[in-house]
Amino acid sequence: MEKEDLELYELIAEDVEQAIRDPASPLRSREYRPVMVALAGYAVKQDEDDALKKWLGSFRRNPGGSLGEHFDNRSAFLELKAEFDSYLEKQGEPSRGNP
């Protein structure tokens, strides 16, 4: 990954975090920052960064999900990525990563 790409993902992650309406959301915490940057990178590669912002703006934690419990970056990213892909499919925009 190029330095410029990482800088772009960080800017998008910051913008997306601001869209999260719940100020107490764990997704706005420092702990989740690497997850948000990775999710922003995924969204950019899918050309869905605007959809990511919209989705996270109304994000509600999946009751069966593990966000905030036994935190680890990889699990949190994979859970959020799956939920984002599901959101895209419901919007009629299947992600390119899931044909």
Image (cartoon, rainbow, N blue to C red):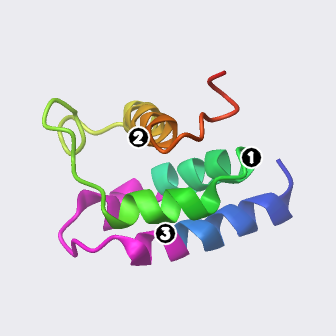
The magenta region covers: 15-33
Please tell me whether mark 2 sits on a helix, a strand or a loop.
Answer: helix
Question: Which residue: 84% across, 65% down?
Answer: 4
How packed is label 3: few (under 14 Cα within 10 Å), some, or many (20 or more)?
many
Which amino acid type is shown beneath numbered disc 3?
Val
Left or right position of 75 against 69: right
**Residue 84, relative to residue 53: is it above or below?**
above
Please tell me whether mark 3 sits on a helix, a strand or a loop.
Answer: helix
**Residue 52, relative to residue 71: is it above or below?**
below
**Residue 54, relative to residue 69: is it above or below?**
below
Q: Which mark is residue 80?
A: 2
State the quadrant of the C terminus: top right
Could you tell me how far apart the alpha carbons at marks 1 and 3 are, in whole angstroms? 16 Å
The residue identified by callout 3 is 16
> Residue 30 in the image: x percent, y percent?
37, 65
The residue identified by callout 1 is 45
The earlier-in-sequence mark between 1 and 3 is: 3
Please tell me whether the stretch drawn in magenta is mainly helix, strand or loop. Answer: helix
Left or right position of 25 against 81: left
> Residue 13 in the image: x percent, y percent?
54, 66
Question: Which residue: 36% across, 67% down?
Answer: 57
35 or 65, which lies in front? 65
Which amino acid type is shown beneath numbered disc 1?
Lys
The earlier-in-sequence mark between 2 and 1 is: 1
Left or right position of 81 against 50: left
